[in-house]
Amino acid sequence: MQWEQLVWEKILWKTQGFEDNYIHPRYFLESLRKNPNFTPYTYCSLLLLTCAITQHASSIFIFLGIFWQLREGSLSPRVLLWFSIGASCFGYACWGILDSWKAPTSLIDSKNLKALKSSILVFLALMSLSPVLRTLTAATSSDSIWALSAVLFSLNILLADYSSMPTNEHGQARLSSVLSMNAAISGSVVLASRLSTDMSVFALVLCSVVGFAFFPLLRRLVQATSKIAWMSLTSVLAFSAVSLAARVSDTYMYLCGSSLVVVTFVAPAILMWAQKFKNEIRGPWDVAVPIIS
């Protein structure tokens, strides 16, 4: 009661007859703020952000469709091999064009030489390991292979880096992105071991390296460069995934199409609906944040 007879000021540098955490009841509710830092989402912005997930899911559906056609013999491994090589060259050309806007010429030349050496080493390593990979899971049942590959590709989706920045401030890839890539490559190797020829194994693993190791780098660079190219790439991948799924089975086509529709269109709408329930309360009980001009 003695405190109420004094004049209280909301300052800390002056000695007063109150405790440091005291606030006058009249000012308590006046300082109450709801959602002070909340910025409402727009459906278009959320739709643009979900394109990264849509592209990644489309890549997995495309890869699974390619594996099924190789296993059934409806796709020649040589066709897939040349397609993977052509896609790699085209993607690297696009990377060079986009990267030339941000990096000096000398640095780009150094990157080109390193990329060429790495590509040759990967190509030779996969070619030499194909006979080993084909017999890797010969003693394992197919049911176990399908379950293991499903777990690995699920980890790939959960750990993937969907941001537009491919590396951190030190130029190194994020740990979750590396783990995601390893899970996808491991799942691809497990599936490739169920193929009948070394050429099919080599073509499928090379396709997985292009799709899950090289393509995410280009995808994030496109995301950070052009929105039009970003949306166009999403449409092409989604259409390719559904078209390829239709050649496998109707069930797979419906699964692929419904998954992409839910991720791309339904999930942003649900988030838009749920944001009205956000209720962040700020008041005088929060720790003061100094503002330095």
Image: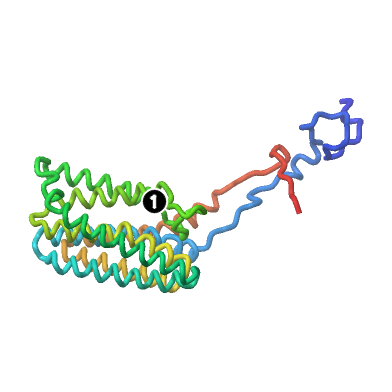
Secondary structure found at label 1 = helix
Q: Nearer the viewer, residue 121 or 184?
A: 121
Q: Percent x, y for residue 134?
A: 12, 50
- Residue 257 located left or right of residue 135: right
On-image quarter of the N terminus: top right
Query: What is the residue that sits farthest to the top in this orientation?
Result: 2
Q: Position of residue 151 (x, y in %)?
A: 27, 44
Q: Residues within 10 Å of mark 1 (few under 14, many from 20)?
A: many
For the C terminus, the quadrant is bottom right
Q: How many marks?
A: 1
- Residue hosting label 1: 177
Q: How is the image coloured?
A: rainbow
Q: Is residue 287 above or below residue 156?
A: above
Q: Quadrant of residue 50?
A: bottom left
How far across and down, in percent of the image, does residue 59 sit?
Answer: 29, 61
**Residue 21 at x, y percent in the picture:** 76, 32
In the image shown, does 104 or 3 lie closer to the viewer?
A: 104
Q: Nearer the viewer, residue 132 or 289?
A: 132
Which residue is found at the position 49% from the left and 68% from the top?
103
For the point 12% across and 52% down, the residue is 131
The residue that appears at 79% across and 35% down in the rendered structure is 23
Residue 20 appears left or right of 151: right
* Whether residue 20 is situated above or below residue 147 in the rendered picture: above
Does residue 226 appear in this view?
no
Residue kind at label 1, given as amino acid type: Ser
Q: Is residue 101 visible?
A: yes
Find residue 265 and report its image quarter. bottom left
The residue closer to the viewer here, 170 or 62, is: 170
